[in-house]
Image (cartoon, rainbow, N blue to C red):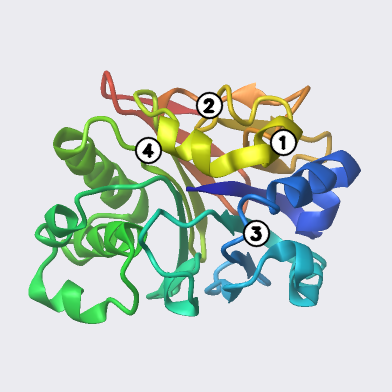
Amino acid sequence: MCRLFAFVSPERSTARHELRGAGLESLLSLARLHGDGWGWAGTDAIGTAPEVRKSARSAVSDADFETAIDTPAHAGLVHLRWATAGLPVNMNNAHPFEADGMAFAHNGTVKPLDDVRALLSPASVATLKGTTDSEMYFALIREQLDLGYDLHEATVRTVRMLRERFPHVSLNALLLGPEQLIIVHASATSALTPHDLERMGPLAAELPVGHNEDYFALRWRESPDGTIAVSSTGVAGAGWNPLPAESVTAVNLRDRSREIVELTPAAIARG
């Protein structure tokens, strides 16, 4: 499980600037628990594939993380990894995953892993570099793209398929492409398990407010300059608004217009 942050700005900005002082402080405090790697992706110019930087080290002790969050981009995402028990901590399993001009980061655990892998075509299985359910989730979205669906619809179709088969998992994810940021907020039936809480150990009492109580919630904020940001709890605080509980949102990088598909019931809202 992980922490997610992303922004889309009318001008190039940085993750550090959009997190602001308190948000960055909270993110770094979360990195003490979510210390199994970090990742950053950003689009230097709208219409171009995002650049990806990542590490299997903790963001707290990695100078490259500081460089990444200071890198200007029109849209960017940050991921802190708390590895699912039993999955290796290495570069192949670090988020975001990168393929076909897109970057993908996930917060959740979809298992059994063999059941997820069984949904993939042999061609998709051959593309896997790591062993995570998250990389498989990304591959399933790309399969839908290969069928001719656009990025938003491909993600919606994949989330609906996974939700039907795995009704209690978190499918929260960020997918950054050349033209869109896709935000999956699909975790209404998800919760930290007693085992997860035990793994937190003494850090649990030191984590930011809201982290444990509503771990899987995603919230968004629009700044006066039109920048849109989205974040996991623990970073999102006062002034942030809840996203629809089961939804997939597409944010256009050019004008920051939003299209939201609510998964239950099926509906589309534009803004």
Residue linked to disc 1? 207
Mark positioned earlier in the residue sequence (3 or 4): 3
Amino acid at circle 4: Ser
Which residue occupies the foreground of this view, 45 or 197?
197
- Residue 164: horizontal and vertical position, in percent? 16, 34
- Residue 23: horizontal and vertical position, in percent? 80, 42
Which image quadrant is residue 141 in? bottom left
Amino acid at circle 3: Gly
Residue linked to disc 3? 76
Say which of marks 3 and 1 sits in front.
Answer: 1
- Residue 39: horizontal and vertical position, in percent? 60, 66
Q: Is residue 260 visible?
A: no
Q: Please tell me whether residue 185 is drawn above or below residue 70 in the rendered image.
A: above
Residue linked to disc 4? 170
Few, some or many C-alpha atoms within 10 Å of disc 4 (few <14, some 14-19, many ≥20)? many
Mark positioned earlier in the residue sequence (2 or 4): 4
